[in-house]
Image: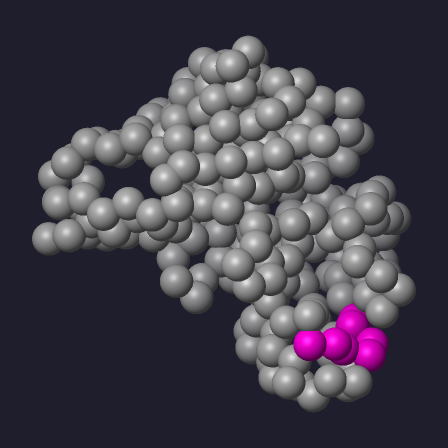
Amino acid sequence: KQEVTQIPAALSVPEGENLVLNCSFTDSAIYNLQWFRQDPGKGLTSLLLIQSSQREQTSGRLNASLDKSSGRSTLYIAASQPGDSATYLCAVRNLGSNTGKLIFGQGTTLQVKP
Amino acid sequence: EAGVTQFPSHSVIEKGQTVTLRCDPISGHDNLYWYRRVMGKEIKFLLHFVKESKQDESGMPNNRFLAERTGGTYSTLKVQPAELEDSGVYFCASSQRETGGGTIYFGEGSWLTVV
């Protein structure tokens, strides 16, 4: 059974710092992995989607990497800003599934202090 | 282009009552999903529609939950009768035709409180 873990559960950093959020999954047979952002009281915003054949994806100050064999993904945020404060979620889609079912981690709540 | 929209955004009902949540996916998206997050837990899959057909309903917790997608457009999720443990956020999501490969887009959620 696929399990997704995100560590740490919470993180507080000063503005301008580069940071890394971690996501691990127990079954490496995944189709893809998606990183989301959730602001308080809001829905999920898709940040990056990495297919299983890819090693990384970049969007602006965000870079997500995927090491499928070791069951790990990281989300790197460069030059963090207070507006980056949110909960970051990773989710995987298993291979062999004919559905789009995502399995989520519990998220990392990030606070960037001015 | 409108994103995934959900209604109501918030609902407070008494135990034993019925609530119906509605989701309008992004136009042209055949795939529609329901997820929920209960307090302190991770977001969990409930079910997946492809057009009007249920592709996977393995996450539906029990028979008090009924999801429909008549005509393959919007979907409803009915909880009847509601129990205290049903409180949480119900997210709807959609994606384009090809399953498994594309980005899944989420709505802002319907926040349900059962008292």
Q: Position of residue B37 (x, y in %)?
A: 59, 58
Residue A2, position in %: x, y?
66, 31
**Residue drawn at (53%, 59%), measured in percent from left and top?**
B40
**Who is closer to the viewer here, A93 or B27?**
A93
Residue B23 sits in quarter? bottom right
Of B30 and A17, the residue lying toward us: A17
The residue lying toward the viewer, choosing from A77 and B74, is: A77
Residue A84 vertical placement versus A32 (above, below): below
Q: Is B79 a magenta residue? A: yes
Query: Residue B45 appears at what percent x and percent y?
Result: 69, 48
Residue B83 within the magenta-colored segment of the rendering: yes
Q: Magenta part of the protein: which range?
A: B78-84
Let me know if residue B25 appears in the view: no
Position of A12 with respect to A53 (left or right) is left
User: Which residue is painted at 51% across and 14% down in the image?
Assistant: A70
Left or right of residue B36: residue B16: right
Tally of numbered tags: 0
Q: Is residue A69 visible?
A: yes
Q: Which residue is rendered at x = 30% and y = 31% of the image? A: A20
Q: Is A16 situated above or below B37?
A: above
Of residue A23 and residue A75, the one placed in the foreground of this image is A23
- Is A4 on the left-hand or right-hand side of A83? right
Q: Residue B57 at x, y = what percent?
A: 83, 49
Residue at (45, 24) in percent of width and height:
A73
